[in-house]
Amino acid sequence: MTAAGTDSDRTGRVVIVVIDGFGIGAMPDAGALRPGDLRADTCGHVLDHARTALGRPLRLPALGALGLGLVHPHPDLARSTRLPVAVGRAALGYPGADTFAGHQTMMGADFSRVTVARLGDHIEEVTAALKAAGHRVTLLEGKPVLLVDDAVLVHDNLEADPGINWNASARLDDLPFGGPHGILAIARTVREVAPVARVIAVGGHADGPLPSYVRDGDGGTVGLDTPATGFYRNGGLEVRHLGARIDHTRQLPDLAARAGIPVTLVGKAADILACDAAVRRPAVATADVLAATLDAVRADGPSLVVSNVQETDLAGHQQDAERYGAVLEQLDTGLAALIPLLTAPTDRLIITADHGNDPTIGHAYHTREYVPVLIHGTRDPGYLQDANSLADVGATAARSLGLSPNDLATGTVTRPVPVVGRRSAGGPPRPLRHWGRNGWAQPESTGP
């Protein structure tokens, strides 16, 4: 997404801050797996919880000034701003609700051929591929789980949303992680035929035989209860994420680097985005993510900085709305320090998310929600058309960097909605009446 008039003959700094798991309301298909997810609203429910738990609203002045309350109206969010912002929302543009797929799509990857699928629906083709590679394959006790070479379990991932990822898991006492016949090699063979976003190779030290930890998951999935095995407790864990086949040369970080623009990937973005030339600053703690982001922005010259604030997502998985709110307040303080650094006419700050993770929804999975798109530094403030995909964020950033969005695998640059009035219930956002030197004018009234 972008507003008209953002092109310039000088490339500035573009900063994309991804608030991991920060949805602003359920997408129409959010209840396909769990009907209750149709009420998901990560932003609204975290704000509501703070009122009850803390007896006060969350303190989010920076997010309010960036227009969060304009795209997600709430009594505890500012209804006006003096900052030059364009605001809208984006559908995810990929199946399910997944951090890896969300970031790859946001950077311009085409995930149209990736599906949500249970391993049990693809047993025959996975078995054939493994046997063709010289492996012994049997069903584990008649379940839709494959036992490969008497050591590796190929199974549904039970820690992500059902059908998003598959795992190839084994004890390192039984099989090495690497090598031509190791866990990773088996996972790579599965990856060749898997239609899902990720195949994850996992090797560790378990408390007992892995088949004893296989259980049923949601949505008809069956897999290894990895936390119960002791893999995460016993040390020596080895993991490799094998993503769906992507042309990384047609993603934003690689495109920017080839144009001579320095690229910095911060937080989880450093772990899951591909770009050989990028400076990587992996971090989980929000304070470390913000510090690395500020350091990157203070550097002279044009740049692309992509930062992921992961602790919001972790709080969602923990169903801890109070912690989620505390992380948002910490992030808001960091954004307040970041905004004054982006003063050049070509500087842009884009705040968005990769999916939802409502901590009040009653389960620990991601929620399929729209996400905010808040663009600071635009020359044409207002509301933006709803984006069909997070790829539009990548197209916006490419345009702001003086790059051609057409060089990305997918993504569309859109313009502001040319009407006035307030957002109608369930409909696209519509711009406020005008932009004045005192901030947003009051919207036309469309009812109580």
Image: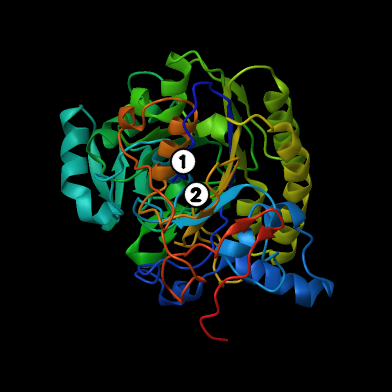
Residue 298, compared with residue 54, is above or below; it is above
Q: Is residue 30 left or right of residue 125?
A: right
Amino acid type for the residue under numbered disc 2? Asp
Name of the residue lying farthest toward the right? 55
Residue at 54 percent of width and 63 percent of height: 24
Residue at 44 percent of width and 53 percent of height: 416
| Circle 1 residue | 103
Which of 343 and 20 lies nearest the eye of the viewer?
Answer: 343
Badge 1: residue crowd in 10 Å (few <14, some 14–19, many ≥20): many
How far apart are the two marked residues, 1 and 2, measured between alpha carbons? 6 Å
Residue 295, compared with residue 358, is above or below; it is above
The part of the image, by quadrant, that contains residue 248 is top left
| Circle 2 residue | 354
Residue 130, compared with residue 27, is above or below; it is above
Amino acid type for the residue under numbered disc 1? His
Which of 431 and 138 lies nearest the eye of the viewer?
Answer: 431
- SS at mark 1? helix
* Residue 408 visible in the shown view: yes
Whether tag 1 and tag 2 are in contact, CB under 8 A, the answer is yes
Residue at 54 percent of width and 60 percent of height: 23
Image quarter where the C terminus lies is bottom right
- SS at mark 2? loop
